[in-house]
Amino acid sequence: MEHYNMNLTVKVWRQKNSSDKGKFESYPVKNISSEMSFLEMIDVLNEQLIVEGKEPIAFDHDCREGICGMCSMYINGKPHGPWAANTTCQLHMRAFKDGDTVVVEPWRASAFPVVKDLMVDRSAFDRIIQAGGYISVNTGNAVDGNSLPINKDHADSAFAAAMCIGCGACVAACKNSSAMLFLSAKVSHLALLPQGDPERKSRVLNMVAQMDKEGFGACTNTGACEATCPKEISISNIARLNQEYLRASLTAEK
Amino acid sequence: MTWKQVFTSSVGKKLTMGLTGIFLILFLVVHAGLNACIWANDHGIMFNKGAHFMGANVIPRILEIGLFAGLLLHIIQGLMLELSNRSKRKVGYAVSYGNEGSKWYSRSMGILGTLILLFLVLHLSDFWYPNRSHQNFVLGEEIDLYEKMKTTFTELWVVIVYVLGCLSLGYHLAHGFQSAFKTLGINNRRYHIMLTSLGYGFSIIITLAFALMPISFYLGWVN
């Protein structure tokens, strides 16, 4: 694709802190290369703001190669912007045309309060993982890869679920701010493997309880989460989560 | 893990919605099947026989109590879930994700359900209430429901409201049917296409069957 430069208007959500009301500010940015990543465009805008003596825009980012799950912008009405199966850092400016206005908002969910500008507090996800997203074993030395036979289909599905990077785009896209796609990926990943089996029941019950405590909504199977997920986590994981929850609650000891 | 904890969790509440939803889907099959007897074109003899069985026999009348219980549970739980889910995002987006990520009717189950509820108030006051009050709410003598349908559907506005009610039901089912099975944990690849097509097929057939009843009377297709 041919390289081109563009001038844009970036309309960004500015909010000083979690108690501030916040509002949109529009900034013109000039000479943006079509080969830049979206975050690099924000870097250019921030340098411009610093030179003008203004506060730069706060935003989350880390690896900038699409694997860490830190970037979290809601761009033109879609988490991580217009491209499918993509993170904000891997969104390139060729997705936009000269003269476009780009609207950038933070994830919106009560369970993800805005810390500043485009940064939200996603520690609710950490607490859900702490409630059961692990296996309790002393790992010791690495065991022989073939010592535990695992069905190939299960291994593949578990790996596909383990692709979740916990970015929270599913919550941002869901009309109910539900964390079910995230939770179901974590539950599926371990439920499908023999290592996850001993804590299978307590895991799903505790993780769902923690998700509810954090203030996420309930799932209504609209599919918006799957459509926006940068790692293409399948919504069939949610059905598996429901299955796991039903089985665990029906067969609970007390 | 108490039962209370199970059914007050977000997954448990959805289970209630799914189970009552499937129960109501089964009711729709019975209701549509019985009402289809109007097309026997025998001046309502077959239809009234069926209606009489449902109204004067003790077993369907006991099941009717279960139907109302299931319906109420579905309505109350549904409205509470809708309100609770809406409260989870205090500040909305300036640009919405819209139809790009999901179907409009899958996001509008609360509104569609409320429209169906409003329609049900009219529908029950048209047929169920006059008939049951005539029976003194026990197993007494019923009114001629075929005649009642005939007179009710002479008014154009009533026919239009009924058709709109059926459309709301159709879209509610288009999402609800498949969603109920997903909530019960069934969404393996081998069932996904089957349940989705079955859901759309069921929604279209039910909507057409019910909507054609008032239309048939209004246009004089049955006698």
Image (cartoon, coloured by chain):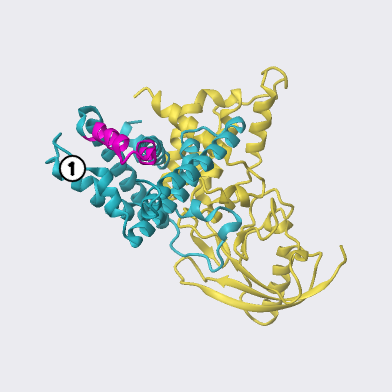
**Above or below, comparing residue B200 to residue A102 in the picture:** above
Query: Residue B145's spot in the image, x, y percent?
Result: 25, 43
**Above or below, comparing residue A86 to residue A244 in the picture:** below
Q: Residue at x 56, y 29 (%)?
A: A191
Tell me if residue B53 is in the magenta stretch.
Answer: yes
Q: Nearer the viewer, residue B201 or A148?
A: B201
Tell me if residue A172 is in the magenta stretch.
Answer: no
**Above or below, comparing residue A90 to residue A188 in the picture:** below
Q: State the quadrant of the C terminus of chain A.
A: top left
Q: Which residue is mark 1?
A: B132
**Above or below, comparing residue B171 to residue B96 in the picture:** above
Report which quarter residue B9 is drawn in: top left
Q: Which residues are magenta?
A: B32-55
Q: Nearer the viewer, residue A53 or B45?
A: B45
Task: Mark yes or no: residue B84 visible.
Answer: no
Taking the image as shown, residue B213 lies to the left or right of residue A36, namely: left
Q: Residue at x 20, y 47 (%)?
A: B129
Taking the image as shown, residue B200 lies to the left or right of residue A64, namely: left
Mark 1: amino acid: Arg
Query: Residue B23's spot in the image, x, y percent?
Result: 37, 35
Q: Chain of mark 1?
A: B
> Chain A rendered in what hue?
yellow
Q: Which chain appears cyan?
A: B
Q: Secondary structure at mark 1?
A: helix
